[in-house]
Every structure is written in structure tokens, then in C-alpha cells.
Image (spheres, rainbow, N blue to C red):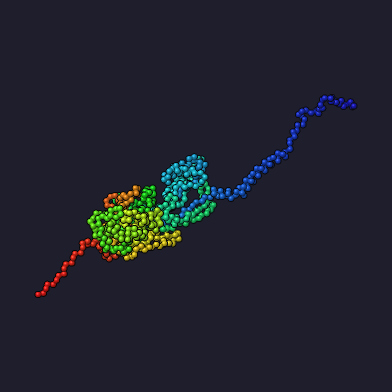
């Protein structure tokens, strides 16, 4: 060992060997981590599952249910609206508008725009309803309920409103839009409770002449469909075909750059009636005045062209204004001239006389002895006035409207009463009693005429003078038009033709013609009907028209009360035509249950006939014929012819 080297220390057993460094100088303790691969695999699996869910959903949306979602998206994005067709006009025979359509608006709304999120107001439906109710004339609660409708972005608040109504709403929309914009500028919510109200172009039915011819025209309902009269019967022609428009929308507003698809509406056809507005006015004014004066339930006047069957006027009183149905009484909203049925009374005697003449059982100058009372079946019959025995011709029976004389005359129609009943029934049937008129009018009644086998004991004798059967006013007028037209019945018509959107006029089909009685019988009847008006013995003298020959017949019948089904009150009527020797116009008038003044047809309907007939003759420029009336005898001398005085013998010549 070198003396300079320090001695080496050998660690003893049980003592650790030191390195000679301090604890701070020793190396830090190393922590070994696990392998990261398992964790990466877990994250990868999780992401894969998430992506798989998205892929599956994407495949479902874009491949499996693509069409359904596309349709739903389109439905939400695109709005589809109906384009209403313009309803055709109804005019009179001269082209004067009786029913037409004007521009109007349907007021609509988008309920989504009234939610708190869209409108920025918690009670937007209620606020909007309070503003709109007085303008639309609707209940505010009803409007609010519509604005709260769920699962739709389209509701109709009111249909067929005038431009003035929409202008008021438009002013409100502008006012609230300006307020909302100002509120936003001041960092407010910018609430607008009326932004979701819109309009759609529509049309409104109007009747320029008010209640004129309302019974014929009818009316349209709130949906714009014909609900009465010709508006209903001709609805398909008048309504046209609705169109359709589809366009993109956003926030309830149309997107102009997104394009649109439109199927145009086809306008309805115009309908030209046979009615003459001026004659209709004269008839309606006359009957309305008399119904009020007589305190009657109602009345009707029918004016018909005897040569063509065209109805020139059909007036009812009381009537209604189709422009304002809220004030109309339900009982007055129909066409009573076609829908009411009643026993005609003595105006039906013309059919009995036609049968007697046509069957050659009597002539106008045939003598008929008429007692004060006549016992037939289970009844004792009388005339409207007590009288001594009348010595009348058959013409006189009609002129004086004798029930007893009519029973005696029609009793000659068969070898016995049942045979006579069958013959009379055949003529009633041919004249159109108990059959449809041919007008095809909604709610029209065909009348009541039982088969002759079913006639009661009393009906066998009352039907000849117009009791025990029922008809409507048009049927009664048609009977007289048939006589005036030489015995040929022409089916009545109300429509002359139609005009399509192309402006082409299509005439209505020609009416059916049926010969009922011979021309000679019709001519003889016309002369007999003149005696009713022209002869002082006649019951229709108040129907005389200076310068014209007039043929007509009065009627006063017992009336069946609709409420009780029993006879109560009277039906007064008058029917006739002019000029009697060359007929052009038929006028029929009836008044139901007059309670003031006279109830006789000649007294209260005769003057109406005269007023309306005079007006119609002048309107159609029908000149008097100038020929003298036939002047058939009404009575005959009952005294036996005196014995001829002995022939004077010449004095013997011286």
C-alpha cells in the first residue's frame, strides 16, 4: 500500500452502501404507464357506433323515406290555394243583369304567426280578434279560436268581404307594422299581433234589383254555392270550375323568386232568362200592394207568352232581398208560385167546359136550367149567391160562374157519373193538373189529382168547379195559355239560353208541345171567356181593358188552412189572356186568405190582372185587333112561345 493512499473502508455487514450523494442529488422515481392501445380501441369503437347511427339515419332519410320527407318538406314550404271561378251572370231576356258577381276578398290567417314566439305577444290571438271582430262583423271569441288552431297554417276568418273591409284591415296591418319597427329600433320586442292576416281574391254575389224576381233567382250560401231557386238548379252551369295555385312561402309570405304553378279557373256560364224585368216589376208591385191591402197571407202573379210558353214574370208577395238574407223570413224565401198548392176554384171550370165542348155534349148556346139548390150524392150544392131559377146558356154558366150549372153540364160527359168522372179526369190530366210543369224548379209541387176511382161522393161533383183537386199558380196559368194557343199546351220555360266563357250563345232546347183540345174548341172557349169580362152578367168586369178584347175567368174557392188541414178562408183568383181573338199574353193572379175587404176573385184579382196585362201589352207593343167580340148569349127566354094569332081572313067581297 502506498503511504499516500488513504485507507479503504469496507462496508460492514448490514449497512448499505452509500454513493456519497445527498438525497436531493439522487435520480427521481419513475412511474410506468399501461399500454394506450386498449383505450384508443374503445374510443374508436364509440365513434364508429355514433357514425353508424348517423349513417343509418341518413340512409333512412335520403333513401328509404326520401319521398315521404320530401313531400312533407314541400308541404311545409309550398302553399296551395283554390282559385275561385267567377260565377256566371243571370240576366233577363234583354240582357239586363238580375244576378251578378263583384270583386271581393276572403280574409285568411296563418295561426303560427299568432304564437308568442312569432308575434312577440303572449295574447296575440285575443288582441287580433278584438281588432278584427267589428270590421268583419264576427264574434271575437270565434275569431280568436280560429287563430289558435293548431297543425295548420291556413284558416279562413270571413268569406266574400268587400274591398272596403280589406282596406280597413290593410290600414291596421300597416299601423301595427310601423309600431313594431319603431319598437325594434328602441330595442323592444317589436310585437305585431296582426301581421298574420291576409286576403285572397274572391267574388260576391249581388242582386242589383234587390227583391225583384228573388223567388225565381234564389240565392247563394256563405260558401258561394246556389242554395235556392235557379241559383241552385243551375249551379253547375253558373259556378264554373275552380282553379288552383301553388307557390313557395316563408313566414306566411309568398317567395316571388321561387316560382309557382297555376291552373286557371274556368268562369261559369251566363244564363239568360225568359223573364222581362219591367213586366216582372209591374207584376211584383201590383201583387205586393194588393196582398198588403187585403191583409192576405200571400199572393202570386204569373205572366206567360201564349205562343212560346216563355214565362215573362213570376212574382210573389211577400218576397225577400237575396242581398241580405239575415232579414229574410224563411216562409218568403221560396217560390210560392210553384211551391204552394191550393184548390183553384172556378178558374178550373174552363177545363170542364173544354171537356163538354170537345166531347160535343153541348154548345155555347145550349140551354141549362139552374135551380137555386141541387142535391147530388150526400150534399146539397148551391152557387155563391142565392137566386131564383136561372135560365142560362152554357156560355152563361161560365160567365156567371155557376157551380150548379157546371155540375149539370159535366154530368153529360158519360152515361153515368163514374163514366163522366173518367172523361173529366182525362182532360184535367191532359191540361197538366197533377203533373210537373216542366220547369224542373227546386221544390216545385206537382199538385194533387186523385184517380177518378178514388174520388169521394162529394168530389165527383166538386172537382168540376175546382174544389177537391190542387194545383200551383204556374199550372193554372198554363191551362189558360193552352186555350189561348189554339188548344196546344207548350211546356213553360224560364231559360232562353246560356253564354259560355267564349261568348257563344246556346239556345235552350225547344219546349215540348202537346195538343190538348181542338183548335175549334179553343176558339169557342175564348169567345165564352170574353163573356165573363165583357158581359154585364159576367163576374170579371173589373178586368176590362179599353181597346182590347179580353178573355178571363174569376175564381173564389174555399182554402185549406196549412196549419189545421181544415177549410178556413178563401183563395181569390183571376186568369185570362189578351187580345182574346189573337192571344199573345196570359196573366194569372191568386191571393191567399184575404182578411180585409172583398174576398172574391173578380173584385181583388181582376184589377191586378188589368194592371199587369195593360203594362205587358204596352211593353211588348201588342196592338188591339180592332175586331168586335162575338157577344154570345148568356141567358135564354124561359117563357113558352106564345100561340100564333089566327091568320086574318079577308072579308068576303060583296
Q: Quadrant of residue 641?
A: bottom left
- How many labels sit on residues? 0
Q: Quadrant of residue 460?
A: bottom left
Horizontal arrangement in the rendering, residue 315 relative to residue 372 (left or right): right
559, 457: nearer the viewer: 457
Q: Position of residue 480 (x, y in %)?
A: 33, 60
Q: Is residue 356 visible?
A: yes
What residue do we see at 25% from left, 55% from top? 372
Single out the residue that lies furthest toward the left. 654
Horizontal arrangement in the rendering, residue 544 relative to residue 105 (left or right): left
Q: Position of residue 169 (x, y in %)?
A: 44, 47
395, 243: nearer the viewer: 395
Q: Is residue 291 visible?
A: no
224, 116: nearer the viewer: 224
Single out the residue that lies furthest toward the front. 416
The N terminus: image quadrant: top right
19, 249: nearer the viewer: 249
Q: Position of residue 265 (x, y in %)?
A: 48, 55
The relative height of residue 237 versus residue 118 in the rendered view (above or below) is below
Single out the residue that lies furthest toward the bottom. 654
The C terminus: image quadrant: bottom left
The relative height of residue 652 versus residue 538 in the rendered view (above or below) is below
Q: Position of residue 429 (x, y in %)?
A: 36, 59
Amino acid at each position: 500500500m502506498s503511504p499516500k493512499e488513504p485507507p479503504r473502508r469496507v462496508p460492514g455487514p448490514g449497512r448499505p452502501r452509500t454513493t456519497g450523494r445527498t438525497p436531493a442529488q439522487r435520480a427521481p422515481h419513475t412511474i410506468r404507464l399501461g399500454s394506450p392501445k386498449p383505450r384508443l380501441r374503445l374510443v374508436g369503437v364509440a365513434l364508429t357506433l355514433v357514425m353508424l347511427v348517423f349513417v343509418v339515419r341518413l340512409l333512412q332519410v335520403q333513401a328509404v323515406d326520401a319521398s315521404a320527407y320530401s313531400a312533407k318538406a314541400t308541404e311545409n314550404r309550398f302553399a296551395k290555394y283554390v282559385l275561385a271561378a267567377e260565377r256566371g251572370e243571370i240576366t233577363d231576356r234583354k240582357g239586363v243583369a238580375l244576378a251578378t258577381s263583384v270583386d271581393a276578398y276572403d280574409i285568411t290567417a296563418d295561426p303560427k304567426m299568432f304564437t308568442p314566439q312569432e308575434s312577440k305577444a303572449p295574447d296575440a290571438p285575443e288582441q287580433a280578434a278584438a281588432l278584427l271582430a267589428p270590421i268583419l262583423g264576427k264574434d271575437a271569441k270565434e275569431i280568436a279560436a280560429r287563430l289558435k288552431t293548431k297543425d295548420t297554417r291556413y284558416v279562413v276568418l270571413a268569406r266574400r268581404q268587400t274591398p272596403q273591409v280589406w282596406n280597413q284591415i290593410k290600414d291596421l296591418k300597416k299601423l301595427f307594422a310601423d309600431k313594431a319597427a319603431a319598437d325594434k329600433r328602441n330595442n323592444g320586442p317589436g310585437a305585431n299581433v296582426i301581421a298574420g292576416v291576409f286576403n285572397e281574391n274572391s267574388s260576391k254575389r249581388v242582386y242589383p234589383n234587390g227583391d225583384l224576381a228573388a223567388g225565381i233567382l234564389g240565392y247563394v250560401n256563405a260558401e258561394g254555392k246556389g242554395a235556392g231557386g235557379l241559383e241552385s238548379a243551375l249551379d253547375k252551369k253558373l259556378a264554373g270550375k275552380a282553379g288552383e295555385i301553388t307557390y313557395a312561402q316563408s313566414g306566411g309570405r309568398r317567395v316571388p323568386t321561387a316560382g309557382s304553378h297555376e291552373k286557371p279557373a274556368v268562369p261559369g256560364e251566363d244564363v239568360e232568362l225568359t223573364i222581362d224585368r219591367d213586366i216582372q216589376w209591374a207584376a211584383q208591385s201590383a201583387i205586393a200592394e194588393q196582398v198588403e191591402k187585403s191583409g192576405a197571407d200571400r199572393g202570386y202573379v204569373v205572366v206567360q207568352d201564349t205562343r212560346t210558353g216563355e214565362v215573362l214574370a213570376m212574382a210573389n208577395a211577400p218576397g225577400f232581398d237575396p242581398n241580405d238574407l239575415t232579414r229574410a223570413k224563411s216562409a218568403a224565401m221560396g217560390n210560392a208560385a210553384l211551391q204552394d198548392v191550393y184548390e183553384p176554384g172556378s178558374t178550373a171550370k174552363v177545363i170542364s167546359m173544354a171537356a163538354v165542348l170537345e166531347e160535343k155534349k153541348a154548345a155555347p148556346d145550349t140551354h141549362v136550367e139552374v135551380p137555386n139548390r141541387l142535391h147530388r150524392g150526400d150534399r146539397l150544392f148551391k152557387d155563391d149567391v142565392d137566386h131564383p131559377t136561372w135560365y142560362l146558356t152554357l156560355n152563361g154558366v161560365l160567365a156567371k160562374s155557376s157551380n150548379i150549372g157546371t155540375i149539370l153540364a159535366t154530368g153529360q160527359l158519360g152515361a153515368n157519373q163514374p163514366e163522366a168522372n173518367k172523361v173529366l179526369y182525362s182532360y184535367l190530366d191532359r191540361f197538366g193538373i197533377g203533373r210537373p210543369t216542366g220547369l224542373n224548379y227546386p221544390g216545385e209541387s206537382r199538385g194533387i189529382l186523385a184517380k177518378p176511382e178514388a174520388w169521394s161522393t162529394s168530389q165527383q161533383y166538386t172537382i168540376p168547379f175546382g174544389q177537391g183537386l190542387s194545383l200551383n199558380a204556374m199550372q193554372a196559368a198554363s191551362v189558360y195559355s193552352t186555350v189561348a194557343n189554339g188548344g196546344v199546351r207548350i211546356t213553360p220555360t224560364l231559360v232562353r239560353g246560356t253564354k259560355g266563357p267564349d261568348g257563344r250563345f246556346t239556345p235552350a232546347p225547344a219546349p215540348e208541345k202537346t195538343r190538348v183540345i181542338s183548335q175549334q174548341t179553343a176558339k169557342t172557349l175564348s169567345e165564352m171567356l170574353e163573356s165573363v169580362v165583357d158581359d154585364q152578367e159576367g163576374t170579371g168586369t173589373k178586368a176590362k181593358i179599353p181597346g182590347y178584347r179580353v178573355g178571363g175567368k174569376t175564381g173564389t174557392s174555399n182554402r185549406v188552412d196549412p196549419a189545421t188541414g181544415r177549410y178556413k178562408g178563401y183563395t181569390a183568383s183571376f186568369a185570362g189572356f189578351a187580345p182574346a181573338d189573337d192571344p199573345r199574353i196570359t196573366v194569372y193572379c191568386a191571393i191567399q186568405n184575404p182578411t180585409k175587404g172583398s174576398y172574391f176573385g173578380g173584385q181583388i184579382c181582376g184589377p191586378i190582372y188589368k194592371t199587369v196585362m195593360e203594362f205587358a201589352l204596352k211593353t211588348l207593343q201588342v196592338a188591339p185587333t180592332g175586331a168586335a167580340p162575338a157577344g154570345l148569349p148568356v141567358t135564354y127566354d124561359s117563357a113558352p112561345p106564345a100561340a100564333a094569332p089566327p091568320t086574318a081572313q079577308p072579308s068576303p067581297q060583296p
